[in-house]
């Protein structure tokens, strides 16, 4: 898969994972596991990139005597999810075109 396309997909998946509630790294990985494998190093690179793009914010809170970073989606992050949904409709049309059967030019 194209690296840029995969990067964009992973970014949107992480945003979707925190859309309904604030979350932290381990929980994000756990929530995404039924859909895809994501390493901690990849996740934290994505989270840093999304924070830099102001698509999420970070707060630190104590949990069981340790500090934990919680991530919250911003309005920009929600807009990115909506943009992705409309882009995906176009991607599906392209996929249908590319994968159609009986290509008479073959």
Image (tube, helix red, strand yellow):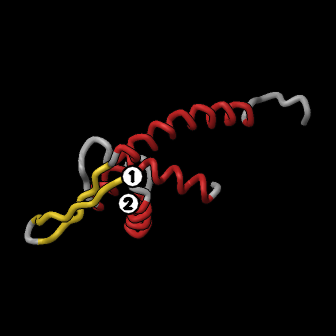
58 and 8: which one is in front?
58
Q: Is residue 100 above or below residue 56?
A: above
Vertical placement of residue 49 versus 32, above or below:
below
At x 46%, y 53%, the residue is: 11
x%, y% of residue 37? 43, 57
Where residue 87 sits, quadrant-wise, is top right
The residue to which callout 2 is attached is 51
The quarter of the image holding the N terminus is bottom right
Q: In percent of the image, x 82 and y 28: which residue is there?
A: 102
Which residue is under mark 1?
A: 55
- Seen as rendered, the residue at the extreme right is 105
Image quarter where the C terminus lies is top right
Labels 2 and 1 touching (C-beta < 8 A): yes
* Foreground pick, 1 / 62: 62
Q: Secondary structure at mark 2?
A: helix
Residue at 53% across / 57% down in the picture? 7
Helix, strand or loop status at disc 1: loop
- Callout 2 crowding tier (Cα within 10 Å): few <14, some 14–19, many ≥20: some
In the image, is 25 to the left or to the right of 13?
A: left
Tell me residue 96's x, y (percent). Answer: 68, 31
Q: Between marks 2 and 1, how big is the CA–CA gap?
A: 6 Å
Quarter of the rendering containing residue 26: bottom left
Horizontal arrangement in the rendering, residue 94 relative to residue 42 (left or right): right
């Amino acid at each position: 898969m194209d690296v840029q396309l995969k990067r964009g997909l992973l970014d949107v998946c992480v945003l979707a994972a925190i859309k309904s509630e604030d979350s932290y790294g381990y929980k994000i990985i756990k929530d995404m596991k039924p859909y895809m494998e994501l390493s901690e190093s990849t996740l934290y690179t994505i989270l840093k990139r999304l924070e830099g793009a102001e698509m999420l914010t970070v707060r630190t809170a104590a949990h069981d005597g340790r500090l934990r970073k919680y991530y919250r989606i911003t309005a920009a992050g929600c807009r990115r999810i909506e943009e992705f949904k409309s882009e995906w409709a176009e991607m599906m049309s392209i996929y249908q075109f590319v994968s159609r059967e009986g290509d008479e030019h073959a």
